[in-house]
Amino acid sequence: MILANACSAAEEKKKNCASNDTACLILELESVTDSIDNQKWRDQTYREIAKLLAKEKKTDQAIVLINKIEHPDTKALTIRGIGMTAAQTDMSKAEFDQMFLSLRNYAEKIEHPPSYAIALTYIAMAQAFAGDDEGAMKTALDMKNDALRNKALAESAEIQAERGDLAQALK
């Protein structure tokens, strides 16, 4: 029934996007997502749309979608998805700095302590993947949860070592 409702909403709003028109397809997907009745599915779909936008380097649009997600764990996973996807792009340092600042601001709004800590872990990992080692260290050290702080530090060091930056990994 839920899928049928989303499909009928999609038929009503169908736009005729070309298969290579990513912007049109993402807009269409977002408009259909609004009509998904099951909150968990809707949250997960917004998470995936955010990752698609991040791949297109539209991180501001991706981050705004976090507002549409209700479950704190899915918010944390969306923050991860945006950060890790964007880290694989050729964004400038200034663009990365702005994105990580925005992701951190959204993480600060997560009221569920475990989900908040996980969001910070993911931000630190994405910063390390993007080559922002100083930012990754700062984000990890800001964490109050000892176990997750140590996990964030270890994950960042592993990423740095895999990049071949052993000196940074051993800090």
Image (tube, rainbow, N blue to C red):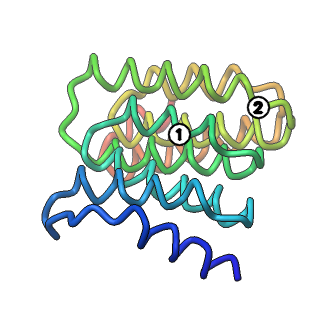
Give percent across and percent down for residue 79.
Answer: 56, 41
Which of the labelled discs sits on residue 54, or is there none?
Answer: none
In three-dimensional space, the C-alpha distance between marks 1 and 2, rounded to whole angstroms, equals 14 Å
Q: 30 or 56, which is in the foreground?
A: 30
Q: How many marks?
A: 2
**Left or right of 24: which side holds 116?**
right
Residue at image coords 67%, 45%? 69
Q: Are marks 1 and 2 in contact (CB under 8 Å)?
A: no
What crowding class fits label 2: few (fewer than 14 Cα within 10 Å), some (14-19), or many (20 or more)? Answer: some
Give percent across and percent down for residue 81.
Answer: 49, 50
Q: 42 or 76, which is in the foreground?
A: 42
What kind of element bears circle 1? helix
Residue at image coords 45%, 53%? 30
Amino acid found under the numbered disc labelled 1: Leu
Q: 165 or 82, which is in the foreground?
A: 82
Amino acid found under the numbered disc labelled 2: Ile
Residue at image coords 41%, 32%? 168
What crowding class fits label 1: few (fewer than 14 Cα within 10 Å), some (14-19), or many (20 or more)? Answer: some
**Left or right of 46: which side holds 126?**
left
Q: Earlier in the sequence, mark 1 or mark 2?
A: 1
Q: Does residue 129 lie above or below 28 as drawn?
A: above
**Left or right of 35: which side holds 49?**
left
Quadrant in which residue 143 is drawn: top right
Q: Quadrant of the N terminus?
A: bottom right
Q: Which residue is mark 1?
A: 65
Q: Which residue is mark 2?
A: 110
What kind of element bears circle 2? loop
Quadrant in which residue 99 is drawn: top left
Give percent across and percent down for residue 166.
Answer: 38, 41
Give percent across and percent down for residue 160.
Answer: 40, 43
Residue at image coords 71%, 22%? 108
Q: Extreme front residue here?
A: 12
